[in-house]
Image: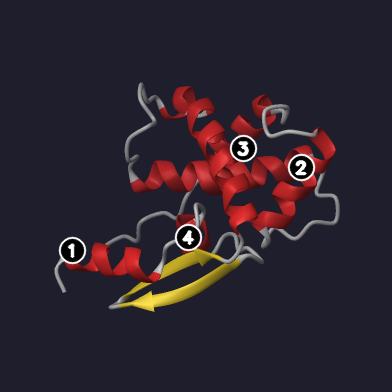
Amino acid sequence: MDETEYRSAYQDINPTRCVYEKAINSRVCNCSQAKRFNLADREGVSCNSAQAQKLCVELMQVLREKARFVLQQVNVDEQLPHNAEIKIQNGGVKGLLRVLNNEALSEQDIFQVLATAISKYQTIEQLPYSVIMQEVAAYQGRRRRKKK
């Protein structure tokens, strides 16, 4: 299966793509609204809730914009490198947990963390992004293995 066929098949079987797919596939976070699937030799993640996906898309747009300085990117509207996306997604969840003072939340459930943050701060725009961006900046992905 070539890449074009893969992307076409992916869009056909996954119309509601999970915004946090890279974080979930990295096994750092999970979500109660996510459903994993396999296509060819790759894993994908779809969202089971239109409401959850809408909230996650909103948050991800704001996180990407706020992370421009941290990532040293002029434009974050395009496709970012994989490590930058992982940094935004995993660091963003860790930042939300930090501002919520880990209020009995499971780091594994992105939707629960986001819903709790919105109930505490009323809107996505009112979240304390200065604290969240500290976690995004500090997030370290997996290190590459040394070749033998």
Q: Amino acid at mark 2?
A: Ala
Other-residue count near label 4 (Cα within 10 Å), few / some / many at <14 / 14–19 / ≥20: some
User: How far is the residue under mark 3 from the one under mark 4?
Assistant: 28 Å
Closer-to-camera residue (65/137): 65
* Of marks 3 and 4, the one in the foreground: 4
The residue tagged 4 is 16
- Among the two numbered marks 4 and 1 on one chain, the one whose residue lies closer to the N terminus: 1
Name the residue located 68 percent from the left edge and 61 percent from the top edge.
Answer: 109
Going from the N terminus, do you reach mark 3 or mark 2 first? Answer: 2
What's the residue type where badge 4 is placed?
Thr
Q: For mark 3, give the secondary structure.
A: helix
Contact check, label 3 and label 2, Cβ < 8 Å: no
Which image quarter: residue 14? bottom left
Which mark lies nearer to you, 1 or 3?
1
- Which residue carries the number 2 mark? 117
Which label is found at residue 135? Answer: 3
Does residue 11 appear left or right of residue 123 in this picture?
Answer: left
Q: Which mark is residue 3?
A: 1
Image depth: mark 4 or mark 2 in front: 4
Residue type at mark 3 is: Glu
Q: Nearer the viewer, mark 4 or mark 1?
A: 4
Q: Secondary structure at mark 2?
A: helix
Assign the C terminus to one quadrant of the image: bottom left
Q: Secondary structure at mark 4?
A: loop
For the residues labelled 1 and 3, the Cα–Cα distance comes to 34 Å
Q: Earlier in the sequence, mark 3 or mark 4?
A: 4
Picture quarter with the N terminus:
bottom left
Left or right, residue 59 beside residue 5:
right
For marks 1 and 3 on the same chain, the one whose residue lies earlier in the sequence: 1
In the image, what residue occupies the spot 73% across and 27% down? 126
Percent of width and height locating residue 104 = 85, 56
Give the mark nearer the N terminus: 2 vs 1.
Answer: 1
